[in-house]
Image (cartoon, helix red, strand yellow):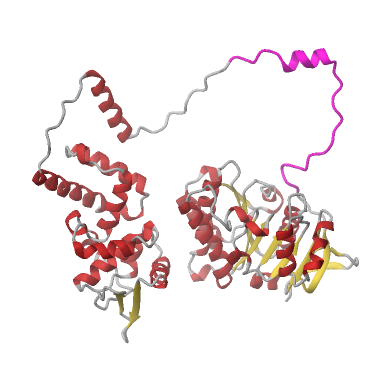
Amino acid sequence: MTVAIEMGQTTAGAPAALDLEELLATRLLVQGNSGSGKSHLLRRLLEQSAPWVQQTIIDPEGDFVTLGDRFGHLVIDAEEHTERGLQSAGERARIHRVSTVLNLEGLDAEDQMRRAAAFLGGLFEVARDHWYPMLVVVDEAQLFAPAVAGEVSDEARKLSLGAMTNLMCRGRKRGLAGIIATQRLAKLAKNVAAEASNFLMGRTFLDIDMARAADLLGMERRQAEAFRDLERGQFMALGPALSRRPLGLRIGPTDTSPRNATPRLMPLPESALEDARAIILAAPPPETVRPQRRSSPDLLDQLMAAKSAALEIRPEPAEPPISAEDLAERRERVDRVLRAVLAQPDAGFRVIGVLYQEFVVRCRIEGLASVVPHLAEFRRMLTRARAGLGSDMAGDDAWQDVSARASLLPEDMQGVFMMIARAAKEGWPCPSDAAIARAYGSHSLRRARRLLTYIEEQGLIVCQLDGLGRRTVTLVELAWATAPGDPNAEEVEQGRLVG
C-alpha cells in the first residue's frame, strides 16, 4: 500500500502529494533563506507523517518541541545529558520505536555538534533486528555538516560531519531516511547534500545558492532568477517522491506552531517623554551576588590548591640536578603508573581528560610530581602505551618511520596504527576487531572494521584474508606483516598489546 501525505497545493491548485515510502528510500534536501517557510515545511511533513513512521528531529533552536504535546514526541534536552547518555538514548529510542526531538537550544556550536553526533551515532549503531523505518530530520544542517572548517575544533567537526555522512550515505540500508534543511547550500558539505534524490527549493537571493539550486533541479541557469520571486511557503519540488519534473507548490497549514512565533508589528505605547526618561535612565538596581552551585570535589584541584598554599608559607627548596640514570628510572616509574591507569577495565572508554587527572594524582602519590608530563605529551604517551610501547621503545630508531606514518592519521587513530605496527614487527597475530575497538576507545566492532578500511585507504596498510577468514595486515614500505589472526576472536591479546 502506497502512503501519500499531502504537503499542500501545486500552483495549478491540485493537491501536492509526497510518497512516504519513496521518501524513505531516497532522502530529501530542503533549502531556503530565513523567512522562506523552511521550518513550516518540515513541521507540515512531520505532522502529516507522524501516524505512519517513527521520527526524530535534530532541533538546534527548539522550534519543534511543541510536537511533543500534540503528537507524543519525547523531547530530549541535550543540555542535561552527556554525549554517552545521548548515544544510549538514540539506541533505546530506535529499539523501542519512540519518536523524539533532540532539543539543542542553549548549547554553543561545538557542544551542539558533539551531542548531535552522539545521538545520531546511537541511531546508526543499533543491531540489525531494530532497523525499523525512521525519518531523521536535521534542521539547519549546515551547522552539523559545514562545507569548510569554522571556529569549532577539528574533533567536533569530524564527529558531526561523520555522523551526517553516515546518515545520508549509509543510513538507507538501516532504515534511516535523512531529511536535511539548510539556509545556504553553499555552506553545506557537498558529499552530504549530494546523497538526496528529492529537493524542495525555497526563496533564496545569493547567486551561488540560486545556481546550485537550479543545477539540482535540472533547470537552466537563466531560470535560477525565479528563486528570488518565490513567496513565503512556496517551493520548487523535484524527485521520485514528489514529481519527475520541477513543480511549484505551496505548503499547507500545520496543527502546531513553534514556541517563538514570527514577530508582528505593534503600536508603541503612549507615554510622556519625561516619564520615559525617568524609567530608562533610572539608577541600576544593586548587583546581587548569585550563590555559586557547589560542584563535586575535585581531587586534583584540591592537591594543586594545597601545594599552592604550602608554597606561600614556605618556599620549596630547589631540587638538585637529576642524573641520566635517575631520569631514566623515573620515566620507567611513570610508564608503570600509566600502565596501572590503563589496566582498569573501563580505561579504554574514558575520555582523555579523566585519564590524565587520575594519572597526575597517581604520579604525585608516587613522588613523581617533577616529571609529570603536560596533557599534550600525555596524549602521545597514551598512544604509545595502547600500542604496547614504553618510553624506551618509542625512542628506538626502528620506530621513527612508524611514528612519521602515524602522524598522517587523526590523533585518535594513531594508537591503533602503532598497535598493528607492533604486532607486525613482533610477528604476532593480527589484532582482533575487539582489540582494535578498545584501542580506539569504542565498543563497536563495526567501527573497528571501518577504522581499518580508512587506514588502508590512506595507503598505510594492506589487509588480506586467507581461506580460513584470518586477517593479515602488512605495513606499506616497511614490509612488516602480522601473522594471520581471527578478526572475531575475543580480546585475549589485551594484556600483551596494551600492557
The answer to whether 487 is drawn above or below residue 381 in the figure is: below
State the extent of the magenta-drawn residues as a range. 257-286
The percent position of residue 424, horizontal first and vertical second, equals 24, 72
The answer to whether 475 is drawn above or below residue 126 in the figure is: below
The percent position of residue 353, horizontal first and vertical second, equals 36, 45
The percent position of residue 102, horizontal first and vertical second, equals 59, 51
Question: Is 261 positioned to the left or the right of 159 in the image?
Answer: right
Question: Is 245 positioned to the left or the right of 76 in the image?
Answer: right
Residue 119 in sight in this render: yes
Question: Is 499 positioned to the left or the right of 168 in the image?
Answer: left
In the rendered structure, does residue 261 fall within the stretch colored magenta?
Answer: yes
Residue 6 in sight in this render: no
The answer to whether 237 is drawn above or below residue 287 in the figure is: below
The answer to whether 282 is drawn above or below residue 107 in the figure is: above
Q: Which one is in front, 13 or 283?
A: 283
Residue placed farthest to the bottom in the image? 467
- Residue drawn at x 83%, y 62% is 226
Residue placed farthest to the right in the image? 12
Q: Which one is in front, 221 or 228?
A: 221
Question: Is 317 positioned to the left or the right of 413 in the image?
Answer: left
- Residue drawn at x 31%, y 45% is 356
The percent position of residue 394, horizontal first and vertical second, equals 22, 58
